[in-house]
Amino acid sequence: MEQQLETLQRWIDQSRNMVFFGGAGVSTESGVPDFRSVDGLYSQSYDYPPEEILSRTFFDRRPEEFFRFYRDKMLCLEAKPNPAHKKLAQLEEAGKLRSVVTQNIDGLHQLAGSRRVWELHGSVHRNHCMRCGKSYPVEFIRDSRGIPTCSCGGVVKPDVVLYEESLDSRVLQGALTDIQSADLLIIGGTSLVVYPAASLIQYFQGEHLVLINKSPTPYDRRADLAIAGPIGEILGQIQVR
């Protein structure tokens, strides 16, 4: 591990255009549940599978049940940025990190200070009326009862990408452009099984590909460096210089 950290530090020191691509594992150290870990949402029992509840079809057909689950399991507003979020913000401030590409919807990267963040799956902090387009803060969803309703009578929907929905084309293109131009791509806290997000790494053409995850991923053999461990613990040891 010590030798791996030395290699990672050297590559970060040498990089001038780094991109970080992260998933749920980045926020587990902040207390946000991981969808696919043993203790994650997917291992728990509900009347409907989480994959079904978090689909657009389910949202349209059973919105009250959707919002009951959403408030209970998807809103972790008490979570705070961990050492991974903070280190990435410091690297951006130092001019080392071009952007963060994230599959998470919790907004912790921005809370830590990151400015250029491509949120592939949206954010719980943005919510809009499906009828008139009026914006609402996350607290409106949290504090509402049943189906959150706009003053115009329309349903207020979180700006998160549900199953069966497409990724935002502007966000996708921005993430793709940054990854294509990066000289160092660090991937952390993701199993790399969710598509199309996982397919973005195929566009990386830079010098070094680094994978940091607690468990193996399908891309470990393609990486120049694969480190097994918690992303916050590992990035927390990196020096910004």
Image (tube, grey):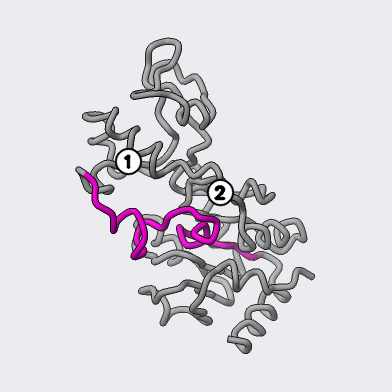
Q: Residue furthest top?
A: 152
**Residue 127 drawn at (x, y percent):** 47, 29
Q: Residue furthest bottom?
A: 3
Q: How many C-alpha atoms fall within 10 Å of the one at disc 2: few (<14), some, or many (≥20)?
A: some
* Residue depicted at 51% across the width and 67% down the height: 187
Provide the residue designation for mark 1.
165
**Residue 208 drawn at (x, y percent):** 57, 77
* Residue depicted at 33% across the width and 39% down the height: 69
Q: Locate the N terminus by quadrant.
A: bottom right
Residue 211 disc label: none
User: Residue 165: which quarter of the image?
Assistant: top left
Helix, strand or loop under label 2: loop
| Residue 2 in magenta stretch | no
Q: CA distance from mark 1 to mark 2?
A: 27 Å
Amino acid under disc 1: Glu
**Residue 30 drawn at (x, y percent):** 55, 56
Provide the residue designation for mark 2.
79
Which stretch did the figure color magenta?
A: 18-46
Residue 195 versus residue 185 in the image, above or below: above
Q: Locate the C terminus by quadrant.
A: bottom right
In the depicted view, which residue is nearer to us: 65 or 165?
65
Q: How many marks?
A: 2
* Residue depicted at 50% across the width and 42% down the height: 170
> Sequence order check: which comes first, mark 1 or mark 2?
2
